[in-house]
Image (spheres, helix red, strand yellow):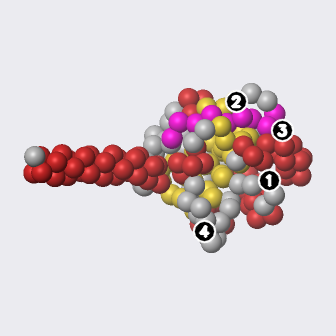
Amino acid sequence: MKNLFILLSTIFISFNGIAQQSGTARRMSYTSAGAPIPNFVIAKTDGGTFTTDQLIKGRPVMIMIFSPECDHCELFLDSLKTIRSNFKTTQVVLVAEERHKDQMPAFVARTKTKDDPIFGTIGTNRGELIAAIYTNKILPQIVFYDNYHKLIKIFDGQYLFKDVAKYIK
């Protein structure tokens, strides 16, 4: 009986460890090269929602995770505007945490992104997009996906703008 208890305990611990590894692998898989864009829903600042299904297939994607209180984020957007002609096919999604929803209109006004076709998809995260890809480093975090919407590169720390600009098509 004691041996049966030990055997069942060992099996339970093993299954529990496998389940935890699967959960960790699932979370981590979105930050590994080649990972797909996680499904998302963004509450757009100008109303409505934008989802993963609305991304244009066959075109690369740049996701910028930012905070409307972040001066670096505003400066980064200003820098992106200087290379406007580089944006031929790259789709841009600007997303902040839902808790910043009330600050978004002021951010959009300050950055003059409201009527800018390049930055038309701006809003707050509804769901797990930020949790799936954010690496908890410096904002803004810039994430690039290829034409098949597979992860190419995450810029999540100190980086040079020229290095980010190389990925814009």
Residue assigned mark 3: 115
- Image quarter for residue 53? top right
The magenta stretch is: 38-46
Eye-nearest disc, 3 or 1: 1
Question: Would you say 54 lies left or right of 66 here?
Answer: left
In the figure, 15 relative to 154: above or below? above
Q: Which residue is mark 1?
A: 68
What is the C-alpha distance between the residues marked 2 and 4?
Answer: 29 Å
> How far apart, in angstroms, are the residues tagged by discs 3 and 2?
17 Å
Between disc 3 and disc 4, whose residue precedes? Answer: 3
Report crowding for label 1: few under 14, some 14 to 19, many 20 or more residues within 10 A (C-alpha).
many
Whether 143 is drawn above or below 139: the answer is above
Which of these two is toward me, 82 or 48? 48
In the image, residue 63 above or below residue 79: above
Q: Amino acid at mark 4?
A: Gly
Kind of residue sitting beneath label 1: Pro
Q: Provide the residue designation for mark 4.
A: 157
Badge 1 vs badge 4, beta-carbon distance below 8 Å: no
The local secondary structure at tag 2 comes to strand
Identify the mark nearer the N-term, 3 or 1.
1
